Image: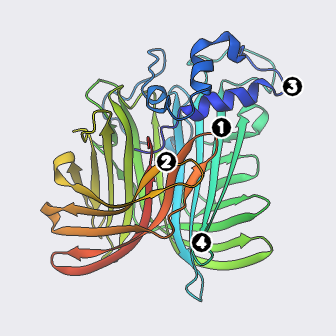
Amino acid sequence: MRKLIFLGLVILLAVLWWLPVEFPFDLKPGKDKSFSKTLSKKDDAFSDVLSEDDQNFARALKPRKFSFPLDHGAHNQYRTEWWYFTGNLSNAQSRRFGYELTFFRFALRPDMLASKSAWRSDQVYMAHLTLTDVENNRFYTNERFSRAGNGLAGASDKQYQVWLYDWSASARGGADFPLRLSAKSDDFAIDFELRAQKGPVFQGENGLSRKSDEPGNASYYYSYTRLATKGSVRIGGNMFPVSGYSWMDREWSTSSLSKEQAGWDWFALQLSDGSELMFYQLRRKDGRIDRNSSGSIVLADNVKVPLKAQDATIEVLATWTSPHSKASYPSSWRLSVPGQNLELDVVPLINDQELNVSVRYWEGAVSVKGTKNGRPVSGHGYVELTGY
């Protein structure tokens, strides 16, 4: 399911309006009442923006056949999509780090106006970069925006390649893997090589991930759930060689959440027995868990075991209140999958992994301990929390 952050679009539009280059639409907030309203209600309008619909964009209505490397590229006829990477890494002295690098594409309209200008584009990109330094209890964030015009940002359908300025995820020597991730800010940077240990996992119904009962409230969604990762992390002037595992999600859609849904808790966990678990719990505004919550377990041999809402339970064991936003988030969970004899305790590596960028959400590295079939199991992963 991942990161349907349409609110980022309206903030992004405000930024782009001020850029002194040609753009095909009048983006002034005063010209669009819904734009102005959403921009002024960063958190309150979150679920409303997620559930906005536009029949002129393509919709995820039924399963489709995926084709690579074509589907690694952009799907401009859909309103939004993302290329999402997270990972848990450590150096030779067992110093632990978590990271996130996500590229978002937003379509401003379903049809492109003809123009001779290289700057004119109906596609805009946003990227988020984070680094969790566990030893120092520090969480670093950075954000970038650009239109796709003139090659400033984009995605290739010839090989895995997505970029925004000098932040990029690019295949090295082939159409898919290995991938090089490279991104930097003034305070920190990452530079990794990722190698797939398993093939792609098509989430939901052969890649169609339904988020509500309404037709088209769905996305096309595939994952690479275990990517061996090596490279370096830079914090200030200090460089740390690191290794570990990453997770990659690819998703595109036009409308996903319904107006009754408030947000989600999303888990991506890599376990010590070679299996992985992805589960997203959709929360309704009336406090109930939505029946469209779902996920999967990927066994060590890459066989997918689908999970429906009733197959997993999530118990919140503790909460944490952000000193930045005053939002209260879950900070410890017990995730149980009775049909797989699996019970996991999930704990953040540090509590403060809240992004306060164009949109606010919690996205953090976690550790996992529990039992599977009565035997101890451990692992690492990432959790995302929205709508709090």
Gap in angstroms between the C-alphas marked 3 and 2: 36 Å
Residue under label 4, please give it: 137
Q: Position of residue 55 (x, y in %)?
A: 44, 15
Which residue occupies 68% across, 27% down? 13
- Mark 2 / mark 4, whichever is N-terminal: 4
The answer to which image quadrant residue 261 occupies is top left
Residue 70 vertical placement versus 118 (above, below):
below
Which residue occupies 13% across, 61% down? 339
Residue under label 1, please give it: 125
- Mark 4 / mark 1, whichever is N-terminal: 1
- Mark 3 / mark 1, whichever is N-terminal: 3
Tell me if 69 is positioned left or right of 130 in this view. Answer: left
Q: Nearer the viewer, mark 1 or mark 2?
A: 2
Q: Nearer the viewer, mark 4 or mark 3?
A: 4
Q: Position of residue 135 (x, y in %)?
A: 59, 78
Answer few, some or many: residues within 10 Å of disc 2's Cα (few below 14, many 20 plus, some between 14 and 19). some
Residue under label 2, please give it: 327
Count of numbered circles in the view: 4
The quarter of the rendered structure image containing the C terminus is top left
Gap in angstroms between the C-alphas marked 4 and 3: 40 Å
Mark 2 secondary-structure assignment = loop
Residue 241 vertical placement versus 347 (above, below):
below
Residue under label 3, please give it: 20
The answer to the question of whether label 1 and label 2 lie on touching residues, with beta carbons closer than 8 A, is no
